[in-house]
């Protein structure tokens, strides 16, 4: 079974600064997807960024980028130029390439953005 | 936004009573999932469906059953609710071959 670990229950960042959220995972599969989701107080789950394991290039979406280290099974999220609206709970998730695409989520990191 | 709704959005029920939560989609997506989210935890998979009448268990399926008689509806039933099932329940959908799951707004269930 896959496991996903987020070792930082809480993080804070100053507005306009950069912050990195950590995620490690354990799997015996070679093909899979990794995701970062944002959950604001509204509870809505919002996809921030995804990474396919077969791609060596790190994914980037505007101010959000990842550092994907497949051998180390590490998948960190970097948020640049942090904004007040980035404050939320962030979840790292692993999804199997097969097996009906079942996902495993980490326990989350609460990000606070200070003005 | 993906067309996915959950009903009810909030429910308070007593221990031992049956409860059914409904997930409805208008996207005709193949896969549907039920998760629960508890404080300090991410989402944990309860059951999922890969087609009409095709369902399977997730990692926390004890005490829950599901049914999918139509593509658009995926029902989660607690046969006899317990206080440990107090949680926020999320439904998600995904098209075959697609990367992304789309999540519903969640249902907050309280079992007293």
Image (spheres, rainbow, N blue to C red):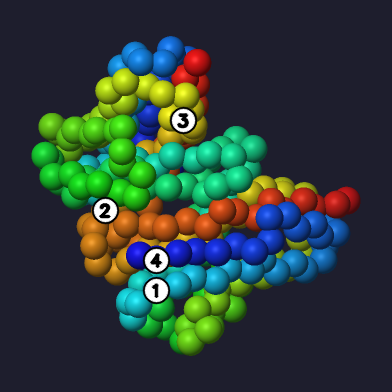
In which chain is the residue bearing label 4?
A: A
**Above or below — where is A19 with respect to A12?**
below
Tell me the distance, in whole angstroms, between the alpha carbons under discs 3 and 4: 24 Å
Residue at point 41% right, 16% down? B15
Residue at point 49% right, 40% down? B37
Report crowding for label 1: few under 14, some 14 to 19, many 20 or more residues within 10 A (C-alpha). some
The reply to whether discs 1 and 2 touch (Cβ–Cβ < 8 Å) is no
Report crowding for label 2: few under 14, some 14 to 19, many 20 or more residues within 10 A (C-alpha). some
User: Which of the 4 image quarters holds residue B85?
Assistant: top left
Residue at point 31% right, 17% down? B18
Report crowding for label 4: few under 14, some 14 to 19, many 20 or more residues within 10 A (C-alpha). some
| In this view, the mark in front (2 or 4) | 4
Instruction: Quadrant for the N terminus of chain B, please.
Output: top left
The reply to whether discs 4 and 1 touch (Cβ–Cβ < 8 Å) is yes
User: Which of the 4 image quarters holds residue B71?
Assistant: top left
Q: Which residue is mark 2?
A: B95
In which chain is the residue bearing label 1?
A: A
At which x and y percent is residue A81? 77, 65
Q: Secondary structure at mark 1?
A: loop
Q: Which residue is mark 1?
A: A27
Residue at point 17% right, 35% down? B68
In which chain is the residue bearing label 3?
A: B
Tell me, yes or no, if residue A27 can be seen here: yes
Q: Which residue is mark 3?
A: B84
| In this view, the mark in front (3 or 4) | 3
Asked if badges 3 and 1 are on one and the same chain, I answer: no
Q: Which mark is residue B46?
A: none
**Above or below — where is B111 with respect to B71?**
above
**Above or below — where is B50 with respect to A82?**
above
């Amino acid at each position: 079974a896959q496991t996903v670990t987020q070792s930082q229950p809480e993080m804070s960042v100053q507005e306009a600064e950069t912050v990195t959220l950590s995620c490690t995972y354990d799997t015996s599969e070679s093909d899979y997807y990794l995701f970062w989701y944002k959950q604001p107080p509204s509870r809505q789950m919002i996809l921030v960024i995804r990474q396919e394991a077969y791609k060596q290039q790190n994914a980037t979406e505007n101010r959000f980028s990842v550092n994907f280290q497949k051998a180390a099974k590490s998948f960190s999220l970097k948020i640049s130029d942090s904004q007040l609206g980035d404050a939320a709970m962030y979840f790292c998730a692993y999804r199997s390439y097969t097996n009906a695409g079942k996902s495993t989520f980490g326990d989350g990191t609460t990000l606070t953005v200070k003005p | 936004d993906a067309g996915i709704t959950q009903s009810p959005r909030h429910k308070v029920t007593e221990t031992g009573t049956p409860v059914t939560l409904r997930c409805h989609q208008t996207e005709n997506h193949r896969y549907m999932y039920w998760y629960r989210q508890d404080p300090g935890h991410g989402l944990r998979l309860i059951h999922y469906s890969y087609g009409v009448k095709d369902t399977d268990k997730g990692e926390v399926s004890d005490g829950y059953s599901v049914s999918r008689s139509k593509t658009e509806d995926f029902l989660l039933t607690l046969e006899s609710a317990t206080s440990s099932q107090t949680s926020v329940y999320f439904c998600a959908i995904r098209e075959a071959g697609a990367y992304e799951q789309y999540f519903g707004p969640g249902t907050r269930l309280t079992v007293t």
